[in-house]
Image: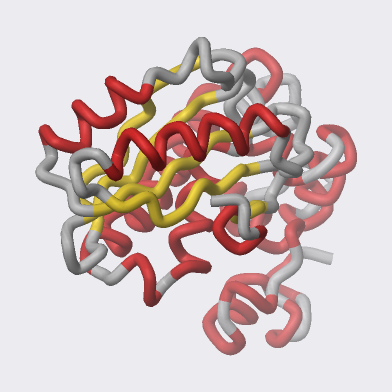
Amino acid sequence: MAIPDWPKAERPREKLIEKGSAALSDAELLAIFLRTGVAGKTAVDLARDLIVQYGGLRALLEADFDTFSQGQGLGLAKFTQLQAILEMSRRHLRETLKRGDVLENPIQTREYLISELRSCEQEVFSCLFLDNRHRILEYEALFYGTINSATVHPREVVKKALSYNAAAVILSHNHPSGIAEPSQADIQITRKLKEALQLVDIRLLDHIVVGDGECVSLAERGSI
């Protein structure tokens, strides 16, 4: 049965309008993106098959072009459309954060850091530079590779913070393993950076370690 013949409350588009996007399943959201199905399959059926084929919605959304194009009904047009949607989502979250107070929106801040770092295949060390009202001045990835005292240079972090006239900094880096548990090296470099920033009267507010969809705050752990 074609989707237009379904009860109105079960059609993905109508359901989204009535109940909001959060009420839809992964397959229903993907079906709206796909717009149409293929011979013998509705868009929802095709979406379900694709989610199974790729092992989940995230794997599909993060697939490179060659992998993405292996899916039925997928190709260059869908891939470019999807990349545009994902980038707009990241930019929307970034602009929303820049308008708000980071400390009043810790969940939103973490969501932003997850969106920036979760999919990175190598460790990326980044900083959120804040003004004296804790509003974001800039986000910048500074170091790549294994994060330890040999690869993260406090002098460079301080230099960047001063260039943005920052009053405070939130550090962040990802664990490609997906496990957000901070290592002893993470704790050591955090304390080293805190001491370096204190010399120029810049406060280190937190160091957030990003795993596979989760974060750990060293400030909440009492490790700063």
User: Who's the residue at 34% across and 66% down the image?
Assistant: 102
Left or right: 34 with respect to 190?
right
Residue 184 against residue 49 in the figure, above or below = above
Image position, residue 54 (x, y; %): 82, 33
Residue located at (59% from left, 32% from top):
188
Residue 200 placement, left or right of 112:
left
Examine the rendering and report whether any part of residue 35 can be seen. Answer: no
Please say if 2 is above or below 8: above
Left or right: where 168 falls relative to 172:
left
Residue 150 % position (x, y): 51, 11
> Can the viewer see residue 189?
yes
Q: Is residue 219 above or below residue 25?
A: above
**Residue nearest the viewer, comparing 114 with 188:** 188
175 vs 158, nearest the viewer? 158
Residue at 23% in and 62% down = 135
Residue 196 placement: quadrant: top left
- Against 63, is 200 above or below? below
Residue drawn where x is 71% and y is 63% of the image: 28
- In which quadrant will I find the N terminus? bottom right
User: Which percent across, then down, holds residue 72?
Assistant: 75, 30
Q: How is the image coloured?
A: secondary structure
| 178 with respect to 150 (left or right) | right
Nearest the viewer among 87 and 162 is 162
| Number of numbered discs overlaid on the protein picture | 0
Q: Residue 216, image x and y in percent?
A: 66, 53
